[in-house]
């Protein structure tokens, strides 16, 4: 995935209310390929997590204890500036840097050549007429007294306050250049600023800074209360691809479908009761943040089927757990920055490790620097060095990074290296940009794309690391 910071300088938008026809629905896209797809030298038995787990000498060895994972997570924002600890942000901040950033983003975006979904070029005048009054950087106060909130539902973080798709290339519907990422239910955020129509907040999330819909953020009276819920020690981790949350303990009315890695705070029992007690034999009771009409937060109980794919606390951090989690997403939809409820390459690895308690950064470059660095390379060079580095990486915890792409290493078979990754397409031509649409999480060996002018996955690997 292209890095979030870089994207700030390559985006544009205009007001949705004036151009309602320029949104692309999922139904307007080409049909998704049916998966899982057989690519390169992959065989059907390799679609099973057990195939790869059974090749390991000790797949159940605990790689990190819960205490070690906590220390690991706390160290990530100290080493990688793009990963922000919301609970350590300054509660009062200077307004000038935020104003300057908003102005820089606006002026840079205004100059971009981008297209709408009807193949029309976005005119520069729309920025002056519609966007500048909405962003209103001149109204950022100095100092800023931070407000704190949590996502009341999964919500997109955008470059500027608009739902309109902005495309770098004609018909390139899958890649909205305004889309940074999708933050999960209960993600804590710090609020810097809001749009003039009160519909958008400019926020800092743990993995990104940008605009989110104000209706999707429940504002807390203070950060201490936010932390009590979003960092509760008693929680469910979503360990399936997604799962339904219900309004009622009878599990009849679905409220939301959070994705893998979402953390759901459990309703605490009365003193003296076992915390495993449930309101019924069929459901866990959890807390949900609610956005009241006043904008403040409220809470309501919601319910999760006790037989659904969740874990009380995190799964053990082992190779078995990691590979099993990864294969639950085999065939799941690709989605740039979380679009269409999918996952891009780093979104896939992020969700897998988050379900195990590892709070990786969101971008592929930043992920590659979290953990143990095995080696770094120039694209197309040092093939022997790459082979040695990949062979030294542990399956399941090994990450293989290319420019703008991240893969989870699975192992070596007959001299071929295999990975599971979320990818959009396979390029197939030495002279053109012809490609086969994949658009899902796949298993492949590293010869994928080898018949294209870009070279194979192996050719383009630039780092090998371990999340350990």
Image (tube, rainbow, N blue to C red):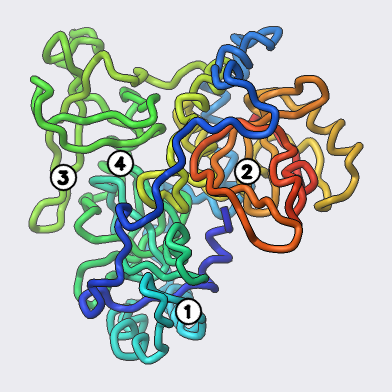
Distance from the alpha carbon under mark 1 to that under mark 4: 30 Å
Distance from the alpha carbon under mark 2 to that under mark 4: 26 Å
The answer to which image quadrant residue 58 occupies is: top right
Query: Residue drawn 63% across and 24% down?
Result: 396
N-term-proximal mark, 4 vs 3: 4
Mark 3: give few (<14), some (14-19) or many (20+) Cα within 10 Å.
many
User: Which of the two marks, 2 or 3, is nearer to us in this view?
Assistant: 2
Distance from the alpha carbon under mark 2 to that under mark 3: 35 Å
In percent of width and height, residue 461 lies at: 75, 45
Q: Which mark is residue 109?
A: 1
SS of the residue under disc 3: strand
N-term-proximal mark, 2 vs 4: 4
SS of the residue under disc 4: loop
Query: Residue drawn 55% across and 17% down?
Result: 49
N-term-proximal mark, 1 vs 3: 1
Q: Which mark is residue 186?
A: 4
N-term-proximal mark, 1 vs 4: 1
Q: Which mark is residue 290?
A: 3
SS of the residue under disc 1: helix
N-term-proximal mark, 2 vs 3: 3
Distance from the alpha carbon under mark 2 to that under mark 1: 27 Å
Distance from the alpha carbon under mark 4 to that under mark 3: 10 Å
Query: Residue drawn 25% across and 77% down?
Result: 19
Q: Which residue is mark 2?
A: 406
User: Which of the two marks, 1 or 3, is nearer to us in this view?
Assistant: 1
In percent of width and height, residue 319 lies at: 60, 18
Mark 1: give few (<14), some (14-19) or many (20+) Cα within 10 Å.
many
The answer to whether mark 2 and mark 3 are in CB contact below 8 A is no
In percent of width and height, residue 131 lies at: 32, 82
The answer to whether residue 51 is left or right of residue 327 is right
SS of the residue under disc 2: strand
Q: Which mark is residue 260?
A: none
């Amino acid at each position: 995935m292209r890095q979030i910071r870089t994207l700030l300088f390559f985006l544009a938008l205009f007001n949705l209310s004036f151009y309602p026809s320029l949104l692309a629905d999922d139904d307007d896209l080409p049909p998704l390929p049916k998966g899982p797809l057989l690519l390169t030298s992959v065989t059907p038995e390799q679609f099973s997590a057990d195939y790869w787990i059974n090749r390991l000498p000790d797949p159940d060895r605990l790689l990190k204890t819960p205490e070690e994972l906590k220390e690991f997570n706390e160290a990530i924002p100290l080493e990688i500036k793009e990963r922000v600890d919301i609970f350590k942000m300054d509660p009062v901040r200077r307004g000038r840097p935020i104003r300057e950033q908003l102005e820089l983003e606006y002026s840079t975006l205004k100059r971009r050549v981008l297209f709408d979904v009807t193949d029309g070029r976005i005119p520069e005048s729309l920025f002056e007429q519609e966007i500048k009054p909405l962003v209103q950087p001149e109204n950022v106060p100095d100092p800023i007294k931070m407000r704190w909130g949590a996502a009341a539902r999964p919500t997109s973080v955008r470059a500027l306050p608009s739902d309109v798709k902005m495309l770098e290339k004609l018909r390139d519907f899958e890649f909205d250049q305004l889309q940074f990422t999708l933050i999960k239910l209960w993600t804590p955020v710090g609020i810097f600023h809001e749009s003039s129509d009160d519909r958008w907040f400019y926020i800092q999330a743990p993995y990104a800074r940008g605009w989110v819909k104000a209706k999707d953020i429940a504002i807390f009276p203070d950060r201490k209360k936010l932390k009590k819920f979003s960092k509760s020690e008693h929680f469910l981790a979503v360990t399936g691809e997604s799962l339904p949350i219900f309004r009622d303990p009878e599990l009849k009315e679905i409220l939301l479908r959070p994705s893998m890695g979402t953390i759901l705070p459990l309703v605490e029992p009365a003193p003296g009761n076992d915390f495993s007690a449930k309101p019924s034999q069929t459901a866990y009771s959890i807390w949900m943040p609610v956005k009241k009409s006043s904008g403040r937060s409220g809470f309501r109980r919601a319910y999760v089927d006790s037989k659904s794919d969740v874990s009380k606390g995190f799964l053990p951090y082992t190779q078995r757990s990691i590979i099993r989690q990864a294969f639950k997403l085999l065939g799941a939809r690709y989605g740039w920055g979380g679009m269409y409820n999918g996952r891009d390459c780093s979104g896939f690895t992020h969700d897998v490790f988050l379900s195990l308690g590892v709070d990786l950064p969101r971008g592929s470059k930043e992920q590659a620097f979290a953990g143990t660095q095995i080696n770094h390379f120039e694209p197309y060079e040092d093939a022997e060095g790459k082979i040695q580095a990949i062979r030294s990486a542990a399956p399941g915890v090994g990450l293989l990074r290319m420019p703008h792409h991240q893969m989870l290493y699975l192992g070596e078979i007959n001299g071929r290296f295999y990975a599971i990754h979320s990818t959009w397409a396979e390029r197939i031509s030495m002279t053109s940009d012809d490609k086969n649409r994949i658009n899902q999480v796949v298993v492949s060996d590293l010869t994928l794309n080898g018949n294209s002018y870009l070279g194979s996955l192996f050719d383009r690997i630039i780092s090998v690391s371990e999340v350990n």
